[in-house]
Image (cartoon, rainbow, N blue to C red):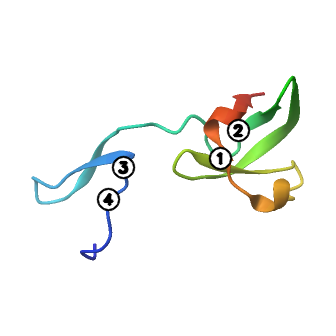
């Protein structure tokens, strides 16, 4: 890892042995790729959509066909609920 790169804040890495390994998630993502979710929009919910990518507390969504939702913009985890 280059000196300018930071380790992901979502995992712990143990390098005390001869081979590094992931110890645990600090914050496990609330959804995984392929999960179906609704987007909360005031008193209504949009969807269901499919989780396309998982980022640091943000997700991109797609339709079942694979077409990006909202032009592929990231959506906060707090704006989603499981379908």
- Give 5 or 1, whichever is nearer the viewer: 5
Q: Are marks 3 and 4 in contact (CB under 8 Å)?
A: yes
> In terms of sequence position, does the residue under pointer 3 or pointer 2 come before the other?
3
Q: Residue furthest top?
A: 43
Kindly identify the residue that appears in the image at 35 percent across and 38 percent down: 26
The residue that disc 4 covers is: 7
The image position of residue 41, as x and y in percent, is 83, 33
The residue that disc 1 covers is: 33
- Is residue 27 visible in the rendered image? The answer is yes
Q: Are marks 2 and 1 in contact (CB under 8 Å)?
A: yes
- Is residue 68 visible in the rendered image? The answer is no
For label 1, the SS is: loop
Q: Are marks 2 and 4 in contact (CB under 8 Å)?
A: no
The image position of residue 66, as x and y in percent, is 84, 57
Q: Are marks 1 and 4 in contact (CB under 8 Å)?
A: no
Kindly identify the residue that appears in the image at 51 percent across and 50 percent down: 56
Q: Is residue 47 left or right of residue 72?
A: right
For label 3, the SS is: loop
Disc 3 versus disc 1: distance between alpha carbons? 19 Å
Q: Residues within 10 Å of mark 3 (few under 14, many from 20)?
A: few
Q: Is residue 20 left or right of residue 42?
A: left
- Give 66 or 6, whichever is nearer the viewer: 6
- For the C terminus, the image quarter is top right
The circle drawn on residue 9 is 3
Q: Residues within 10 Å of mark 1 (few under 14, many from 20)?
A: few
The circle drawn on residue 35 is 2
Disc 2 versus disc 1: distance between alpha carbons? 6 Å
The image position of residue 62, as x and y in percent, is 81, 52
């Amino acid at each position: 890892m280059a000196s300018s790169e930071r380790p992901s804040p979502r995992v712990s890495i143990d390098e005390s042995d001869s081979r590094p390994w992931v110890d645990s998630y600090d914050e496990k993502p609330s959804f995984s790729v392929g999960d179906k979710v609704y987007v909360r929009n005031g008193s209504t919910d949009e969807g269901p959509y499919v989780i396309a990518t998982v980022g640091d507390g943000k997700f991109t969504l797609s339709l079942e066909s694979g077409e990006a939702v909202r032009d592929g913009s990231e959506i906060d985890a707090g704006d989603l609920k499981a379908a």
